[in-house]
Amino acid sequence: MRKMIINVFPGAINVPLWSGIEQGFFAKRDLEMEIVYTPNSVEQLTGIAAGKFDIMLTSIDNIIAYKEGQGEVPADGDTDLFAFMGSDDAFLCLAVQEDIESFADLPGKILTADALTTGFAFVLRRMLALNGVDENEIEWMSTGGVLQRWQAMMEHPEQKGTLQVTPFEIMGASRGHHVLARASDVLDAYQGIVGGARVAWAEENADDLSGFIAGWLESVNWMYDPGNRETALDIISENMPQMPREVATGACDVFFDAKTGMRRDGAFDVPGIETVLDLRREFGPAPDDLHGPEHYIDTRYLEAAKGR
């Protein structure tokens, strides 16, 4: 078996990865998966550029940013990155403290993000604009990835809101947090999470990469089978023992919704990538440097995964 190192953000959204390992979907493609969890996008993107791991699950905006030299920090190494499969729209929502009742309550308050110039911060800024909030009236704070932002809001009630990923908004409900708006309410299409890698690494490891994709898709489709739900919940409990089962159940209901859940075929949402690029053109540092969606994706490995 060949070892493949994958870098991901913590959270129940990794259940297809955990299930694929436990059910042997990767092993039957001769892959031994090693998971490395990242605290934030800077560590993830600089890490993959430095060759610390092979592939990652990340937002496609992160890939675009670092490929075009627009990342939160300069990255040494190989930043010729690309996305090899699509997963989902990231299930984004604006989660806020109990005392925030509407967008009108946000001016003068602290909102948090991972990296302020990449990832999902642009989505949050679009949400604010569409709801009449001047982003210059917001006090911005960078507090890390989804897990770190959730923990920070629990510990620091002066942090009034952040863009969250399921199931963290469900977990926060017990502390009075609630969802002010969902990204799907304001964006017609959005490509959130993708599988990403360095172009050079993928070319040298094409068979392993297509094998990973095949194992991932088998696991996602296994998760959609209602007969596997209890086993899947057990797997989440094994990997996140602090998560109540009812929260895990709610998360799976979102992740594997027949209409809006994870992509069963790994296809990209190309209009959704256009939205990501539009947001970067609006809020990013160098809008003229961006290309079309095809510059940031390569479907050859996804095609090669079919039938494996």
Image (cartoon, helix red, strand yellow):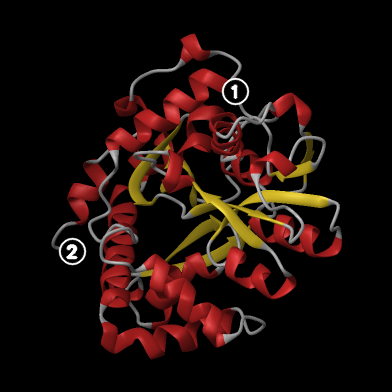
Element on which disc 2 rests: loop
Q: Is residue 176 above or below residue 278?
A: below
Element on which disc 1 rests: loop
Q: Position of residue 302 (x, y in %)?
A: 24, 49
Res 273 seen here = yes
Q: Position of residue 72 (x, y in %)?
A: 68, 30
Res 1 seen here = no
Q: Position of residue 203 (x, y in %)?
A: 34, 39
Give the labeled residue for mark 1.
70
**Dot 1 or dot 2, earlier in sequence:** 1
Q: In the depicted view, which residue is nearer to us: 138 or 4? A: 138
Q: Is residue 140 left or right of residue 288?
A: right
State the quadrant of the C terminus: bottom left
Where on the picture, by quarter, is residue 175? bottom right
Q: Residue at x 29, y 57 (%)?
A: 263
Q: Which mark is residue 308?
A: 2
The amino acid on which the numbered mark 2 sits, given as a three-letter code, is Arg
Q: Residue at x 69, y 39 (%)?
A: 104
Residue with the most extreme top position? 288
The amino acid on which the numbered mark 1 sits, given as a three-letter code, is Gln
Q: Is residue 45 left or right of residue 229?
A: right
